[in-house]
Amino acid sequence: MTPHVTFLHPELSFSGPTQRTLSTAQILIDAGVRVSMLTRSASRQAAAEATGIEVHALDMSPPPISRPFFKTRLTEKLLNLQPDMVHMTDTTLAKLCTPVLRDLGLQYILDTPRPVSEPVAFDQELLKSVVIPSKSFEERLVNGARLPRERFSFLANSPGLFEPGEVRGDEDIATARQLLQTGGEDAVPVIGCSGHFDHGHAHGWFLDAVRLLVRSGKKWRFLLIGEGPEEGRLRRKIREQKLGKHVVVCVPPTRTARRTLASLDLHVGCRVDTGPGWLTAQTMRLGIPNVVAAVGEAFALVDDQRTGILVKPGDSVQLADALANLIQDPERARALGQAGAEHNLKHAPREEFERAVLELHGAVKNA
């Protein structure tokens, strides 16, 4: 019988946790595991389906008026799917989902995409593993979330060359970087940040630095690659500061997600709740020079001034200066990007990520 894993995921939006989840699912599918997912649809649904995931619609974060019915709906979905294992991808789902898994007697894995300060519901008997992308999360997950340390499995962000669901061509990274470049040697520099636009993503800090650069006469192109609950506020700020000619907010389609990241001359890691995540690691592996908010995992991922540049989050002047200095010194920027790629691959080898994913789901794979 083919083993079956069901992922419980908040939303298929463009974000580091979603890309990590899709990559994890891809590894399982390639190993012959059936993978299904209960989630709310968003821009990455096409990527999930192209990966081979059976996507089933369910609002995993229902409004208060619908919560009394959520347990019944989730129970019905899981009874129909009959998974061997459940993989819960976010601690925000634990309160509503854990009682259902307990009632059904389903073993599960819990991902922790961010450190949590409040207790997280879990079942002592059924929780197989707590997957943590950064050791900087450990203290808060033990003392705040009160999750069992003995179940922790550290699994650093380790993107593959291709995005999940992407059509795999023969182009190498260098060719991919040229796909969105225009203008030859006179091309305008492209600077971007990526991720889920929520309270933990300092897109406002990035935009403040953009405003300083534009005021100083820089006619560069700035991309904010992502979506999320703060997108409306972000777009209003762009309009109010009259930056629309310079700034583009976008969500790349599945076929061009990696190519969009590869088109950047510089990338800014704007996450301040977790430190740089999956998408920053992706850009580093593409050889893109990175300027990163100096929090959390940043201190392990970036050797300041050698494999990237660390900047105090919120200091828009320091960020603008770091970006301007790199654009004006392309040789240093290239060296920084190359060193960052080498350091990132060494810090979190893809082979180890794939092996660990299969090991975590080993009881299912060998069922």
Image (spheres, grey):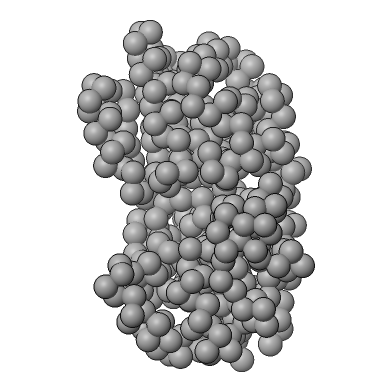
User: Relative to 275, does residue 40 appear above or below in the rendering?
Assistant: below
User: Residue drawn 49% across and 27% down?
Assistant: 314
Can residue 155 be seen in the rendering of this structure? no
The quarter of the image holding the C terminus is bottom right
Figure check: 182 above or below 22: above
Q: Position of residue 197 (x, y in %)?
A: 39, 44
Q: Is residue 160 above or below residue 109?
A: above
Residue at position x 77%, y 67% from top?
150
- Pinpoint residue 24: horizontal percent, then vertical percent: 59, 63
* Residue at the image point whose x is 52% and y is 77% from the top: 98
In this image, 350 relative to 258: left or right?
Answer: right
Using the image as rendered, state which of residue 177 and residue 100 is in the foreground: 100
Residue positioned 39% across, 55% down in the render: 13
Left or right of 284 on screen, residue 78 = left
In this rendering, position of residue 279 left or right of residue 179: right
Identify the image quadrant of residue 40.
Answer: bottom left
- The location of residue 3, given as percent across then percent down, is 61, 84
Compare residues 339 and 293 and report the one nearer the observer.
Answer: 293
Quarter occupied by residue 72: bottom left
